[in-house]
Amino acid sequence: MRTSLSRLPRPTAATSKRWLNLHEYQSAAIMASHGVNVPPGIAATSVADAVAAAKELGGDEVVIKSQILAGGRGLGTFTNGFQGGVHVIDSAKTAEYAEKMIGATLVTKQSGAEGKPVNVVMVAEKMNLVNEMYFAILLDRAFGGPVVVACAEGGTSIEDLAESSPEKIIKVPIDVVAGLTDANAEAIVAGLGVSGDKEAAKKQIASLYEVFKSCDCTMVEVNPLAEDDQGTLIAADAKIGFDDNAAFRQKDIFAQRDESQEDPRDVAAEKWDLNYIGLDGSIGCMVNGAGLAMATMDIIQMHGGSPANFLDVGGSATKEQIVEAFKIITSDSNVKALLVNIFGGIMKCDVIAEGIVAGVKEVGLEIPLVVRLEGTNVELGKKIIDESGLNITSADDLDDAAKKAVAAI
């Protein structure tokens, strides 16, 4: 099924948020409200709900789709051994399939090895699709605005197709002031290879762009965008990403956020205004400033260690935030040592030191802790740590701190 072109998480000094993503059934509802043709479908959170949904749809066959925030569901594997997160089935078998999917964990090539929990399945009407295409609208720095990416071949990995047959993919930049023009729509319809009503198809493209514009999207992706046997264009799949900066005016959309699909450490960090990204190493990092955090991770790597996370407490963290940062880092069982590297400017070293001492006591830290402080109130900060009576290793500079953290493991 769908492969997403959504952005990968990346470290940033500004925010720890990711672009909001919604499940397919949520995205389909938004599309339908803007005039986009979508297959009739019903979300179900239990086997009984799934069976009732199949009966309500009324067909001999239905499509049952696992709802997770990752692409590649159709080719995914559940940790219980069940193959495939999307199936076309006889309606009478809905309970059998729903039991294997709801409450299970689905692993796809985009979910990571740990997979994602399937709390909801969407039971949808089986459409007679005869021509599958790919369609997406993305914000692209190279074009300075939105660009439509379209291809006459869809329903499979767009990344694989881009590698094997890039000439089949068209890109149509959209002027953010002029909006989607008739010429834009014609070029997109031609690139999709639409065989049915071209004017009706252009209206569907316009409706998809309206979703992108009015909902403050960073991405609208439909894979496949398909024609049925009547030549009607249908968004047979739906993936939408939203700009977090627009949360204040898209309250209804952001209220649908599913935190069960996110790393709980990311969720906790966001609540405390901390910038956190989990990695797969063994040395936890607490740093102020994104550049210093990147340098710290690099030097740990250079001395033979591996960073377990990126955590930037920012330039004005409080004692309470430092304590929470300790809790988040140490919640990762892979963390075998902790390195705190603070350069005090606006952030005062004594405040950091108080937070470190409080964090160690509250967490009951049992792993090695190396602290390097420099800058504003550094002597006072070092004094607070030295007089704490806690097992904390001080470092003179970043290189020394990295060496000691690696050696401690």
Image (cartoon, helix red, strand yellow):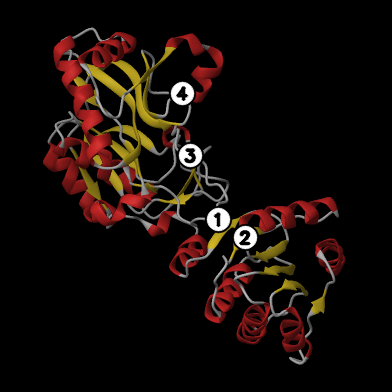
Query: Disc 1 marks which residue?
Result: 13
Q: Are marks 2 and 4 in contact (CB under 8 Å)?
A: no
Residue 236: give x, y in percent of width and height: 27, 28
Q: Are marks 1 and 4 in contact (CB under 8 Å)?
A: no
Residue 191: give x, y in percent of width and height: 34, 10
Query: Disc 4 marks which residue?
Result: 158
Find the distance from the CA under tag 2 to the CA under tag 3. 22 Å
The disc label shown at residue 7, or none: 3
Give above or below for 19 relative to 178.
below
- Lower position in the chain sequence, tag 3 or tag 1: 3
- Lower position in the chain sequence, tag 1 or tag 4: 1
- Lower position in the chain sequence, tag 4 or tag 3: 3
**Secondary structure beneath disc 3?**
loop
The amino acid type of the residue labelled 2 equals: Gly
Q: Residue at x 83, y 72 (%)?
A: 395
**Secondary structure beneath disc 2?**
loop
The amino acid type of the residue labelled 3 equals: Arg
- Lower position in the chain sequence, tag 1 or tag 2: 1
